[in-house]
Image (cartoon, rainbow, N blue to C red):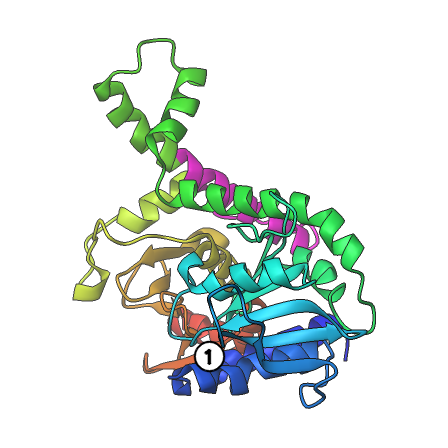
Amino acid sequence: MEFAELLAALAQKVRNQREAIQTEEATKNAFVMPFISTILGYDVFNPLEVVPEFTADVGVKKGEKVDYAIMRDGEVQILIECKKSTEPLKIEHASQLFRYFAVTNARIAVLTNGETYQFYTDLDAPNRMDEKPFLVLDLLDIDDSLISELKKLSKDVFDLDSVINAAEELKYIGQIKRTLAAQFKDPHDDWIRFFTTRVYDGAFTAKVREQFTTLVTKATKQFLNDQVNERLKTALGGSNFSVVDANVAEEAVTSQPIAEDDLDRDTEIETTLEELEGYQIVKAIACGEVKPQRIVHRDAKSYFAVLLDDNNRKPIARLHFNSKKQKYVGVFDNDKNETRHPISSLDEIYVYADAIRDVVRHYEN
């Protein structure tokens, strides 16, 4: 299997088993050891390559251990500290990594809970581990741009110099991307001010800030929706049907009251880029049966609905994307019974294309 395929296979294993993993030891056995062996290619049962419970006395700290040390030519190259998968990673978890990094030859330190892997080096000061990772790998949401860098740490093509040389750029690009994502979700005052002062000549008063907070948030969502549309057009080979317009989408979401309680409008409902992209895929499938403007979406508290004619009695599909643990696509039979199918990527929605077209044909007949 190719490196990317091995990574995808491990990601699927994490999705399938994460509910059963409740302890740190279980996390190591089920997720971290397969990562070291399958992805990085080291023999976890060979102490010349992987040393579990690695000990190196540090000053007055005696007998402290790091979960794994990866060796090359008798020298420590990578240190790995593990936490249980149910526990979010915090820099406070890396205290042993900080100490061991300074007294070994390791240039790479990894903090992981089996799902997320944070890679550190010493960009800020020699032989002192940085407080921020230069690479963050989330197995539940793999960034394809990081795969080639991760591969450089594998046994067969180990290239530490190349990794270190690229680390600074990776670190800041990753931080910028995460900052952008946070601003798109919940814009800060300085983000609002940045855009406001470029389009508005008046003073940035509290009233102006309140007004432009709404406008910037709306413009951001429309921009993301435009990007989804462009990606869909490209994927469909430049199809000439009219994809959803951001303004139309806004109207469709709030166009009329809906009977079900879980479709009531709620200020806590947040429509994500992934939901919009999934909607566009469902729409592209259904457009083989009806005109595209008849297919609309409504976001709900527990799911994202795709409807025919903006009618909640004509559901085409539901996207259950709110859980980070597992995503589902719900499809309907002719009696409007929903069956939820687990998916690991948006492309898998196409597997249920026949069911989506069938229910649309049923409503038409």
Image-based side of 270 in relation to 131, left or right: left
Quarter of the image where the C terminus is located: bottom left
Q: Give the main secondary structure of the magenta stretch.
A: helix
Going 61% across and 50% down the picture, which residue do you hit? 231
Question: Within the magenta stretch, is there residue 235?
Answer: yes
In the depicted view, which residue is nearer to us: 341 or 187? 187
Q: Position of residue 109 (x, y in %)?
A: 60, 63
Image-based side of 149 in relation to 17, left or right: right
Q: Tag 1, which secondary structure?
A: strand
Question: Within the magenta stretch, is there residue 198?
Answer: no
Q: Residue furthest front?
A: 60
Q: Position of residue 284 (x, y in %)?
A: 55, 60
Q: Residue furthest top?
A: 202
Going 26% across and 48% down the picture, which residue do you hit? 254
Image-based side of 74 in relation to 272, left or right: right
Q: Is residue 189 above or below residue 44?
A: above
Q: Position of residue 243 (x, y in %)?
A: 52, 48
Q: Which residue is mark 1?
A: 342
Going 52% across and 77% down the picture, which residue do you hit? 352
Q: Which residues are magenta?
A: 219-246
Residue type beneath disc 1: Pro
Q: Position of residue 122 (x, y in %)?
A: 63, 50
Does residue 136 appear in this view? yes
